[in-house]
Image (cartoon, helix red, strand yellow):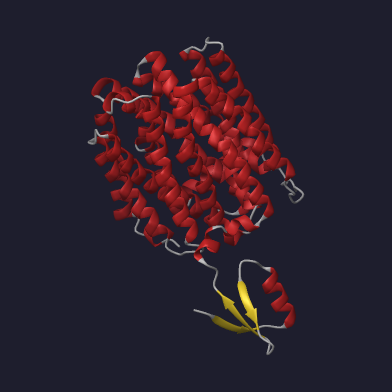
Amino acid sequence: MKKVIFLSNMEQKDLFEDDKFTGLENTDNTVIIEPPSRLRRTFTALRYRNYRLWFWGQMTSLLGTWMQITAQGFLIYELTHSPVFLGYVGFAAGIPSWLFMLYGGVIADRFPKRDILLITQVVMMVLAAILAVFTFLNIIQPWEIVVLAFLLGITNAFDAPSRQAFVNELVDREDLTNAIALNSTMFNTATATGPAIAGITYALFGPAWCFTINAVSFIGIIIALRKMKMKEFVPRKRNRSTFEELKEGVHYVFTHPVIRTIVILVGIISVFGLSFATLLPAWAVKILGGDATTNGFLQSARGVGALSSALFIASLGRFKFKGKLLTIGSFGFPALLVVFSFIHWLPFSLLALIGLGASLILVFNIANALIQTLVTDDLRGRVMGVYTFTFFGFMPIGSLIMGTLAEHFGEPTAVITGAIVTLSVAISIFIFMPSIRKLH
């Protein structure tokens, strides 16, 4: 429905230069503002030049990243034929979060985030190249994959807090939720396409080419970061030690009831829910009787669901029912996980994974947006350090638990166990923290 407002000539000029709106100007100084279309709302953050560079650079890099994740998981399973080794790789990649990620949040508050990201992207590119060379030479061993995963985990511990907080510097605060949703869109576009491409590439040419493509893909984000025009970085005055600053961020999270509850929910889902993805290479072979291509399709199906969910969130614009969506996701994910555990036919497995991906994004996207909205700017890096530590730091524990359970009791039992724990926590939050579902 059109809204009519009266503006001065200067206000009209400012309005029409702001491409968040479209309008018609009458000679009597009346401006009829048409609300932006759903498509326009969905991609609002892309009107910022720096965010556009970030979006397309990250999209290229993430495509390669998901190719490597998919190929690496299937390669380690081919080398060992053991689901517990899948857990070892996940554990090695995530355990550095316990050692460095909270400190990475302090670093994100102290130094220009773009500079930090440039360094981490170059290191990740080098690690991918090393993995590719070892695989091409046919000298790759399971323990070498574990070591490289550990080194990548260290790099990610410094990359993730800066990456999460960096988005706030690329768009205005009012468009932050949209930017986070579009971040998820690009991530899950790569999740939807990268694994499928990796599965086909692996089957036709071998895993080394998947790792090579990943190494080359980092060039896109490195160029994008260097082309950005950022505001001059003004370092905070530091009159406290690193430990005191880190402690301040942790204390803020655990004394803020809403942020604390959201972080706990994300942590539980990371340990007992998301870690089911660790088992997908074994699931493709043992449960579905497939191969590397099957594994790629399973990973991509989850990405398709996540992408659809991210686009849905982005299309809502500046909506005010984030708590309700968070609640829907927290219940929908474990319910679908139970359904998935009983399916032994590929088409239905793919449908269940699409639903799982969609519900996961409802939780993680909305959780991220709510925390970034609630936290103050001077604590943003440290709070996002705690958030990303919860996400990445607890996931390896879940990978180890899932791998061990699958080794002794089978993959379906491991998945059902995780679903029951996750659902129990969602029910507890629904009963004891009703304020969460009322969040805007």
Q: Is residue 179 above or below residue 301?
A: below
Residue 29, quarter of the rendered image: bottom right
Q: Quadrant of the C terminus?
A: bottom left
Nearer the observer, 95 or 204: 204
Q: Nearer the viewer, residue 229 or 159?
A: 229
Looking at the picture, tell me which residue is in the foreground, 210 or 362. 210
**Quadrant hosting residue 11:** bottom right
Q: Position of residue 422 (x, y in %)?
A: 31, 42
Left or right of 67, for residue 130: right
Residue visible at 66% across and 56% down? 48
Please report the residue visible at 45 percent of the width from the left and 47 percent of the height from the top: 307
In this rendering, does residue 163 appear at all?
yes
Is 206 drawn above or below residue 268 in the view shown? above
**Viewer-nearest residue: 239 or 392:** 392
Q: x, y percentage for residue 152?
A: 56, 26
Residue 252 at what x, y percent from top left? 53, 48
Residue situated furthest front in the rendering = 204
Place of residue 330 in the rendered image (x, y in percent of width and height, measured from the top left): 35, 49
